[in-house]
Amino acid sequence: MDIAQVKTTSYKVVLPFYLYAAFSFLAAALLLFTASPAFLAHYFQPHILAITHTMALGWGTMIILGASHQLVPVIIEGKLYSNALAYISFIFAAVGIPLLVYSFYIFDMGAFAKWGGRFVLLSILAYIINLSVSISKSKNENVHAFFVLTSAVWLFLTVSLGLSLVYNFTSFLLPQDSLHYLPLHTHIGIIGWFLLLVIGVASRLIPMFLISKYTNTKLLWWIYFLINAALIAYVVLFYLSGNSSFILLLTLVLLTAVVLFGYYCYRAMQQRIRKQIDEQVKTSLLSVALMVVPVLLLFIIIICISMEHKEHVQLITAYGFLIFFGWLTSMILGMTFKTLPFIVWNKVYHHISSIGKTPNPKDLFSHFNYNLMSYCYLAGLVVFVSGIFLSQVLFLKLGAGLLTITAVLYNINVIKIMCHKRTLT
Amino acid sequence: MNVVTNDNIKTTAAVAALQQVYDPEIGLNVVDLGLIYELDFDNEHKQILCTMTLTTQFCPMGESITSGVKSALKSTFPDYDVELSLIFEPAWKYEMISEEGKQFLNR
């Protein structure tokens, strides 16, 4: 077999997604800093919606789309079907996201919001077509591919519902107001898209990065079915306006899936051949632990609602914040510096890797900067969440300030990697 | 190290050169990693056929590793044409890492 037949996705496809995500993280952190007091009131308000969508789409979704264009060939052991579709996906999302975020910020659900939503939907459609054809052409269909494809379908449903909610502000498309559907939109996005995709990809990458002998396809299938069953049941219950004790049961199913995935990572760690674990993989493993926190908060929220028949706004705000700035961000902070240096290293050195001594991919970014970023991040996360529970604007400002520094340090390192020039010794 | 060959003497030189080609993610050379399956020397036609694998198909580092292997063999045997055959059957597995490689990863 010739190397051209197993050539991975071009860096040209992947890097724009990474860069866009890095800027989005900075924009979201700045918005968080300027709009911190909004976190003391109800979560359904323009600035929080703008921040949430910058984080969910600009940061989380863009970097995951970029990484998945690179990693899907590794996972499905087949080529990415089309680079052109990947560019189309990027362009539509890159145009649509700012339109949508700006519309939320000024809370005008007019033409900008609608076009923003349409563009994002088209972007996801291009991604699904690309993914489906790539998987159908690949000879190797595995559990990871099912995770990735199913998550993309949930993403499509999330964005479709989101666009309907935008229309619902002006056209009364749905039987109830948009706020009513917000939990459905949020949870199919978080669980169906982010959680499924992260588990599908991480269950392949974490053993690879640890050089672990551990594989357990049966356990992964169980996790897959538990998550999808819980989510489908939740959608049905939502439609039937089911009571919260059923939702509590579904949360328990979800928690079981998350704990099983934690167990999978633990066993992979135990059976690893490489003893040392680098900082980036440690950060990603931290994100696995951070998955449990929002699920536990969800338990408390549902119990409070069923017992006291009222919403605890602080708990719900903290829940959402910990998903986007906690679990998702910690995973991305770790995985960016595990994947991006290799993509750039490959771009710069792939033809000359044996001519002279090349730097290691991990030498392409500043580790001092990375460690400082990690400390700022953890401190910012804890201080901001404390600010939500203590209703202290000062804590919110301080936490958001630390997260902004995190985003700045992240951007500096990302740009440093992307601008790396060839050095041979 | 279990490289199948038809010329032990040339293979010693080839392996020494290939031990300078590293998988940048793992930090281990391609020989100790067990990626090189066979080195076939056709002295009459001055050709080397290197049969090797990658840790996974569509490995993002695949192009860099194969290009490194080709360059290392070419610079050791400048009179020979080097041809690479990339196979995934048998697939690479962790047991293929040499004892030296395992010790390196266990540090």
Image: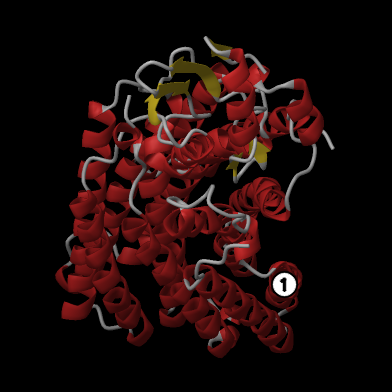
Depicted A413 relative to depicted A274: above or below: below
Q: Is residue A206 left or right of residue A117?
A: right
Foreground: A350 or B7? B7
Q: Amino acid at mark 1?
A: Phe
Kindly tell me whether residue B50 is visible in this rendering.
yes
Tell me residue A331's x, y (percent).
59, 54
Which image quadrant is residue A363 in? bottom right
Question: What residue is at 67 percent from the left and 54 percent from the top?
Answer: A280
Question: What residue is at 67 percent from the left and 42 percent from the top?
Answer: B27
Kindly identify which chain the residue marked by label 1 belongs to.
A
Depicted A100 relative to depicted A18: above or below: below
Tell me residue A104's x, y (percent).
34, 79
Question: What residue is at 72 percent from the left and 89 percent from the top?
Answer: A394
Kindly tell me whether residue A250 is visible in this rendering.
no
Question: What residue is at 28 percent from the left and 31 percent from the top?
Answer: A135
Q: Is residue A349 left or right of residue B95?
A: left
The single residue placed furthest to the right in the displayed view is B107
Q: Which residue is mark 1?
A: A389
